[in-house]
Image: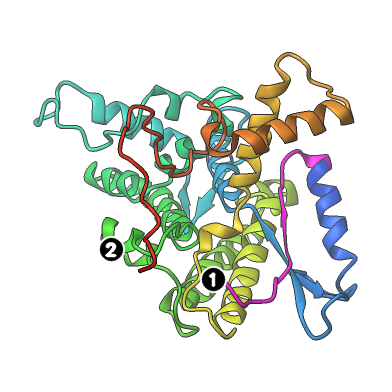
Amino acid sequence: MAGVWVVSCLSLKFTRHMEAARNVRFYKIHGDDDAQLVYWTTNNHRPGHKIYFISDVPHLVKTTRNNLENSGANRRTRNLHYDGQEITWRHIVSVYEWDLDPQRVALGMRKLIKLKTDHVHLTPSLRMRVNLAAQVLSNTMSCTLASQGRHDTEGTRKLIGMMDRFFDCLNVKSARQGDRTRKDDLKPYRDVEDARFTWLEKEFLGYLHRWEQQAQQTPGVTKDVKNRMCLSKQTLVGLRMTVLSFIELTKTLLQEEGVTYVLSDKFNQDPLEQHFSKQRRRCGANENPTVMEYGRNEVNLHVMGEMLRAVRGGNVGGRAQVPIDYNNDTPLAKRPRNR
């Protein structure tokens, strides 16, 4: 985006309870005491402009999947319900086993072709992988649940459908991605009147608001039970903060001179995580490098550049890179002669 002033954007992660509490305190000090949600603060280094708070979108997808997993499975700290219907991880396990059932009519013709045991039976390390969470909270999963013909999975299908489109809207990686995948939600943002802005603000945030209201208005149960019937407070705050910041920031960028489109994927932390995964690989078994060791590793990483690939087993998927053909003997283009 040449010619655009840098608009500061801070990405916050909601992980463990203590870290989430520190994050909440951090951005609350930038708002009024009565403000229910703070998603921006004044930029003192550029008067008249804002600094936006954005939680890492892939991480929000993982925390939402973890909330779903903890509803009816794993730690059982959630008891998710929406419109009187249960939202539970048991539905995911059930549809996975149904898809593998040899007694089905179309033997060998699976619907959930990407789903493996790692998606359903998670370990601490598997819970860190973004692709596993995104493939569970996908439109394919929602359609397969509908294929079962069970009415009790409507609440789970609604959540999965909402999160699938939310992730698509905030995961636009290239200008041609939408045309290649035939998905309008993966096309770049070019207009401040883009319909996706309305969907995110009205439909998606409205869905979260109605869900939270339903949970809090449930009669005859304690406050703790009400809180467990919806997504965790940290996840709800992260989703709302990210959507509002993204909409306002993207519209601001599109009004800048020289900006033709905005790619929403640029607001996540994947490149940063990949860089530090390379740092950890350079350190080997040393988990506490000194400043000098860290600096030496940075120099080495800078020298190797694109020749060093991201860690294969990392939390995020690798970025598209042009493979290096070391056997290519094609001569380099020659400088034209001046005649």
Residue matched to label 1: 206
Residue 136's spot in the image, x, y percent? 42, 40
Q: How many marks?
A: 2
Q: Principal SS element in the magenta part? A: loop
Q: Nearer the viewer, residue 145 or 237?
A: 237
Q: Quadrant of residue 266?
A: bottom right
Observer able to see residue 127: yes
Front one among 112 and 246: 246
Residue 129 is left or right of residue 237, and the answer is left
Tell me if residue 72 can be seen: no
Q: Residue furthest front?
A: 339
Residue position marked by numbered label 2 in the rendering:
179
Quarter of the rendering occupied by the N terminus: bottom right
Examine the image and state in which quarter residue 241 appears: bottom right
User: How is the protein colored in the picture?
Assistant: rainbow
| Circles 1 and 2: CB atoms closer than 8 Å | no
Amino acid type shown at disc 2 = Asp
Q: Which residues are magenta?
A: 2-18
Q: Nearer the viewer's eye, disc 1 or disc 2?
A: 2
Whole-number angstrom distance, CA of label 1 to CA of label 2: 29 Å
Q: Residue at x 59, y 38 (%)?
A: 305
Residue 95 in the image: state x and y as whole percent. Answer: 32, 34
Secondary structure under badge 1?
helix
Residue at image position (56%, 30%) is 314
Which quarter of the figure has residue 278? top right
- Residue 109 in the image: above or below residue 167: above
Q: How crowded is the residue under tag 2: few (<14 C-alpha within 10 Å), some, or many (20+)?
A: few
